[in-house]
Amino acid sequence: MSAKPRVEAVNDFVVKFANVNGSGSASANELFAKSILRMGVPVSPRNIFPSNIQGLPTWYEVRVSEQGWQGRRGGVDMMVAMNPQTWDADVAELTPGGYLFYDNTRPLPPAAFREDIHVIGMPLTEICNAVYSDARQRQLFKNIVYVGALSVLLEIDPAEIEKLFGEQYRGKEKLLASNVQALQLGRAFVQEHLQWPLGIRVRRADRVGNQIFVDGNSAAALGCVYGGATVAAWYPITPSSSVAEAFQRYCGKLRVDPETGQNRYAIVQAEDEIASIGMVVGAGWNGARAFTATSGPGVSLMTEFIGLAYFAEIPVTIIDVQRGGPSTGMPTRTQQADILSCAYASHGDTKHVLLFPEDPHECFEHAARALDLADRLQTPVFVMTDLDIGMNQRLCRPFEWKEGTYDRGKVMSAEELEAGRDFGRYKDVDGDGVPWRTLPGTHPTKGSYFTRGTTRDPYARYSERGPDYIYNMERLLRKFRTAAGLVPQPVLRRADAATRLGVIYFGSTSPAMQEALEVLAAQGVHLDALRLRAFPFGDGVAEFIAQHEQVFVVEQNRDAQMRSLLVNELEIDPARLVKVLHYDGTPITARFITDAITSHVQAVQENVE
Amino acid sequence: MTYIAKPPLRHPTLEKNRVGYTRRDYEGKISTLCAGCGHDSISAAIIQACWELDIEPHRVAKLSGIGCSSKTPDYFLGASHGFNTVHGRMPSVLTGANLANRDLLYLGVSGDGDSASIGLGQFAHAMRRGVRMAYIVENNGVYGLTKGQFSATADSGSKSKKGVINSDSPVDLVSMALQLGATYVARGFSGNKEQLVPLIKGAMSHGGAAFIDVISPCVAFNNHPGSTKSYDYVREHNEAVSRIDFIASREEITASAAPGEVVDVLQHDGTLLRLRSLHPEYDATDRYAAMGFMQEHQARGEVLTGLLYVDPLATDLHTALNTTARSLNTLDAPELCPGTGVLAKINASLR
């Protein structure tokens, strides 16, 4: 026994909960994560769930990191094994010296355990059966009982948990009391019967500050509310459905005319993604800010309309919460695999504006920004989030908003038309490639035109003449160059020491990358890092690549899609861009990035030697 | 596909309507469809109906899909904004446009390929939702632009110009519209303008989803013996359920006909549809009776025309969604953005 290792760590460990889908564990697990946050210690939880409503295994992995690392770490220090179906794999996943917490109401044979881990058994079922008679209560409170037990084992302040109960069950005193009772049941048992605390513990810190804890889908939805979206059309698809649902929830609170009780928004659950984007196109054409939220398969269905919106120049905002493809792929797992399909969506020569938020803070900011950009540029704009930041709560900077008006872009008014201002719907009068538009119904005799996906001259008259087509296509390119200056610019992080190595990354890879950069620097591997925030790429991206001998491109897909986009759009020699690809459906980790980069650097050094 | 704009001649003696426009003001570019195409007659009927309704042309938004029929919005209401969308998807674009601005009148023009084949789903769902619009299908049973393939509304047993017999059952858009909840359902014939104009006027002033299936022979590919969408066939088999007169709300209703002969249907906006029944047992306000009556007559090979069903007090999607009276596209930051104070509270709730 004395030789058995024991994980010892304060505020730096991973706890994983193995549960059965539909057992009510999600809210208990969230309670666990939030109670640690309330102690001032950063956590990053991740739901790992199946495409299922009830019965299949589901996991909730909580990384506790006083340093504030939000990326998935990899490895598990404590497993709360509540699902017999996945027992063997769950036990196997534990780090040597880790802790296995389980319900020992029914004894398990010694072969079910490992020699090198610490086993903590607690008769959860027995305790709940003794106290509760209702089957559902027994199940639900079992989850709270184990949270109580963990609070003793890990030294989580029970007052924080009770405070959270108080917030959740405000005005529902009975529920509040029964939850507190379940919590105390768990605590009392551990205090009486088990050894505590464990080698892994939570200690109060002050590392959370004014950060907020929220999922990216809710954040994007709120961004659409703030950004002035009035029309939303969508079709349910994991992992994006909660964007539309959150938009509905926020609008119900924030967008109802207080005097009339009428809604300042319209949300339609369409019959499919084609109709969703069609409605957004119609609303955008008619001057309302509109968006849809979808995922890869939905984008595939929308591509014909996306081409129309590009060519007919209609503002459209699409929030693409990426998941694993191709086909149905891994609908409940994360990837960044829609980069190319969105950048070049549709037939013919098309290019689209993409924004890459790194966390919920930017999901909010980019969603609102996308609505402005779509109006300004009269084109589809994609907000490329993913399941990892979309469906998981993440600690991030609070939402920020600057009061002001919306940028509605170049919309010619009835007064301007009346004053005799020349109106050519597809004419570049300002040199930025962005034409003026009129909204239907503006003026009795001036400014009407026929919108279509076929070619036309600068005055929107049907034309199949080559020069008219070329004028239009060149102008669209000019417009795309204008876009490069309007989109969020990349964020540069210089290494502490001068280096010829660079790394490019984007989106949800961000926290794992930050952590990897620290670890690598400590090992003497210094890299300048550039976080892309949008496509088209600004001048800074080509410059960054030019300044470095080797640039790693870290992304979460098989085919190095961002690297292809960089090579293609900036005419970069592919040999300069080293692929670092993570695509098994789990969020990328700092360990993975560190290993990939160090092994490449070592290989290069060995070659040199 | 028009290269030629009509010369803007204005004859001083042309009659003006109550909003000061002549019929010419409702015209568009010169049609590029084949001479004798039924679609051009429908365009003419739309022009007539809008002029008679005293609609300012720019208050109409006209939307279409792809196909011969979908090109026609370029040939009427030149002062209106038009949108030639993608094949079969006009209904969703129209729905979105309507949500953005409830103050305009929406005219959707589609064809049988556009609505009954590729766009059947969107057709169905727009009807279900009760989008306020006049949705006109110019139905010729054939793909014109791609030269004569059968469409999904071609009757089983009808013969193509090349002599092929269609073996598939037809999609009957009128029956579908009735079943799916459209609140104004009619069928017209492009060769009968007298019947068609009041049907369009009724649809344009209807409060919900109005659908008109207009049989519109294709002179190039579907006007031969053996076709059931030819001028001759439709004239021979046309069976009108009623004659309809459209009476604007401001007009004084004078002559009252003998009971039983005439049914007056008062719409939500005060307009009146006066139906002169040609079948005494037909009740155009009874959805299920209308469906049964139609099925019976169609089984006999008759092409039933006229106003087949109307719910005069129908409401629309905006009513269902409880949207504000002010059009959504007129709202700006003060009405839409909750502001920094609210955001501070939201931030606080997420800690």
Image (tube, grey):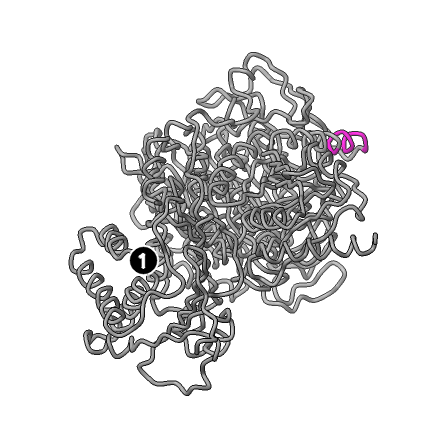
Is B200 rendered above or below residue B326?
Answer: below
Q: In this picture, which residue range is highlighted in magenta?
A: A466-473
Out of B209 and B223, give the one closest to the viewer: B209
Classify the position of the C terminus of chain A by image quarter. Answer: bottom right
Q: Residue at x 47, y 48 (%)?
A: A67
Instruction: Report whether B290 appears left or right of A527.
Output: left
Out of A26 and B320, give the one closest to the viewer: A26
From the top left corner, tell me how far across and down residue A495 is, in percent. 64, 39
Q: Amino acid at mark 1?
A: Ile
Out of B314 and B31, give the one closest to the viewer: B314
Secondary structure mostly seen in magenta is helix
Q: How many marks?
A: 1
Would you identify the image quadrant in which residue A100 lies? bottom left
Classify the position of the N terminus of chain A by image quarter. Answer: bottom left
Query: What's the chain of the residue with tag 1?
Result: A
Residue located beneath label 1 in the image? A156
From the top left corner, tell me how far across and down residue A113 is, in percent. 45, 81
